[in-house]
């Protein structure tokens, strides 16, 4: 016969208390892990990842000795990326190399730590960092206590998983940066190399054009003009390539001087007069006299040339209007065509690098002109915008501070 005794208030209080302690410890772990995840997601370089991981290992696991190792040679020899805690890292390094070779976690209780001298040494854990089934490093941790509890083991495994992901991403990011830098360097050298012979060629063709006009007859004159246009186009393309490297390296330096913007616009229009005739676009110019501004004249010429040549290129043989006016402390330049126009969803993106809104087969180009124009205008403290509708034409408006 069994009897049910009176409730045991002390026993039930103890078990309730223990359950609460367990729940609190679990919540505490989770919040530590969340903090570590946030810190790791912001880490940009492998060293940042290592710093965030070692800090988290101390904060959430109480690991007093910590080291993160990554392969330093092509045959996979490990080197310390970051270490913290006691200076004697030998036992940790021994466990780390065991974990690296076996690709499995190595757990060592306090008394058997590899390389431990006589006397008490705490527990060790060495966790291989795996990314896409590939080992990319080892996280080795040393503790003051002799054994690592189950909960802490799970937490260490979660931390090493997060660390591996962040480390892999940081390495990929560095590789991408190196590749982008190599590309920029190549572009810089290539555009420089192209520019030198093109400069000489431009000069020679200009002289040839003068001779052809004087002595060569209309046929010869026409052919030399065609060569001149193409050489100019090549020179503009190689300048655009050179500008990409300057702008992305933050080296777009302005040589500002007091300049008559009205004269600059009229000169620009005169420069494209031949091309406008070829493209059958009538040009009207509405420019007051003078509009003085402190600007980089050469760079502003580039802005005007680019906008005019786009208007001719996409203008579908319709008239083009160029207007300059002063509005308070600003100059406003508007170039309008009645050409193919630009769809609303493309009107922002065409100012981006390599962005185009036309078929490459129909219209040649690199998609760099408007990007460079915007960089130059913004470097002057100005703005550029477009109003356009497909098949109705486009107006590009540049606003520039005068002072
Ligand atoms: P590119 O002309 O070499 O493509 P741009 O950077 O000068 O490069 O122009 C980017 C894109 O903007 C062009 O490809 C074209 O789609 C669009 N665009 C620029 N100017 C005009 C214009 N006047 N009319 C219609 N579309 C234009």
Image (cartoon, helix red, strand yellow):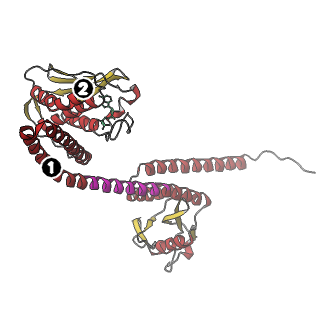
Q: Residue at x 34, y 20 (%)?
A: 392
Image quarter of the C terminus: top left
Q: Is residue 244 visible?
A: yes
Which class describes the residues within 10 Å of circle 1: few (<14), some (14-19), or many (20+)?
A: some
Q: Note whether 360 is above or below 198 in the view shown.
A: above
Q: Secondary structure at mark 2?
A: loop
- Residue 280: mark: 2
- Any magenta on residue 349? no
Q: Does ligand 1 reach within 8 Å of label 1's beta carbon?
A: no
Relative to 207, is 98 above or below?
Answer: below
**Residue 251: percent from the left, percent from the top?**
20, 46
Whichever of labels 1 and 2 marks the residue nearer the N terminus, that label is: 1
Nearest to the observer: residue 313 or residue 93: 313
Instruction: Classify 10 Å Cα crowding around label 2: few (below 14), some (14-19), many (20 and above).
Output: some
Quarter of the image for residue 263 reads top left
Depth order, front residue of 397/7 = 397
Query: Is the CB of the residue bearing disc 2 within 8 angstroms of ligand 1?
Result: no
Place of residue 397 in the rendered image (x, y in percent of width and height, measured from the top left):
24, 25
Query: Which image quarter: residue 216?
Result: top left
Task: Report the residue marked by disc 1.
Answer: 201
Q: Is residue 166 magenta?
A: yes
Which residues fall within the magenta stretch?
A: 165-187
């Amino acid at each position: 016969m069994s009897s049910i005794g009176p409730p045991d208030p002390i026993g039930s209080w103890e078990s309730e208390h223990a359950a609460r302690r367990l729940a609190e410890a679990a919540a505490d772990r989770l919040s530590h892990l969340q903090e570590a995840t946030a810190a790791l997601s912001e880490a940009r370089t492998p060293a940042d990842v290592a710093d965030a991981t070692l800090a988290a290992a101390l904060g959430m696991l109480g690991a007093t000795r910590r080291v993160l190792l990554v392969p330093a040679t092509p045959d996979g020899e490990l080197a310390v990326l970051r270490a913290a805690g006691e200076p004697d890292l030998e036992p940790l390094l021994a466990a780390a190399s065991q974990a690296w070779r076996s690709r499995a976690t190595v757990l060592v209780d306090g008394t058997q730590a590899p390389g431990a001298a006589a006397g008490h040494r705490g527990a060790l854990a060495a966790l291989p960092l795996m990314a896409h089934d590939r080992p990319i490093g080892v996280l080795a941790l040393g503790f003051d206590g002799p054994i690592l509890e189950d909960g802490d083991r799970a937490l260490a495994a979660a931390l090493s998983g997060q660390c591996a992901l962040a480390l892999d991403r940081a390495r990929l990011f560095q590789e991408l940066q190196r590749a982008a830098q190599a590309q920029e360097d190549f572009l810089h050298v290539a555009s420089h190399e192209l520019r030198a012979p093109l400069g000489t060629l431009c000069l020679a063709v200009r002289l040839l054009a003068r001779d052809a006009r004087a002595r060569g007859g209309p046929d010869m004159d026409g052919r030399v003009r065609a060569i001149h246009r193409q050489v100019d186009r090549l020179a503009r393309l190689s300048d655009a390539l050179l500008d990409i490297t300057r702008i992305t390296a933050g080296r777009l330096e302005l040589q500002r001087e007091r300049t008559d913007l009205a004269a600059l616009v009229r000169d620009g229009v005169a420069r494209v007069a031949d091309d406008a005739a070829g493209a059958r676009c009538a040009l009207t110019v509405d420019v007051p006299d003078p509009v003085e501004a402190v600007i980089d004249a050469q760079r502003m010429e580039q802005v005007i040339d680019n906008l005019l040549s786009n208007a001719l290129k996409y203008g579908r043989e319709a008239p083009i209007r160029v207007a300059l006016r002063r509005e308070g402390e600003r100059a406003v330049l508007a170039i309008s065509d009645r050409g193919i126009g630009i769809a609303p969803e493309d009107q922002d993106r065409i100012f981006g690098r390599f962005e185009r809104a036309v078929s490459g087969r129909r219209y040649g180009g690199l998609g760099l002109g408007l990007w460079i124009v915007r960089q130059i205008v913004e470097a002057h403290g100005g703005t550029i915008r477009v109003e356009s509708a497909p098949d109705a034409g486009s107006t590009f408006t540049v606003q520039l501070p005068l002072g």
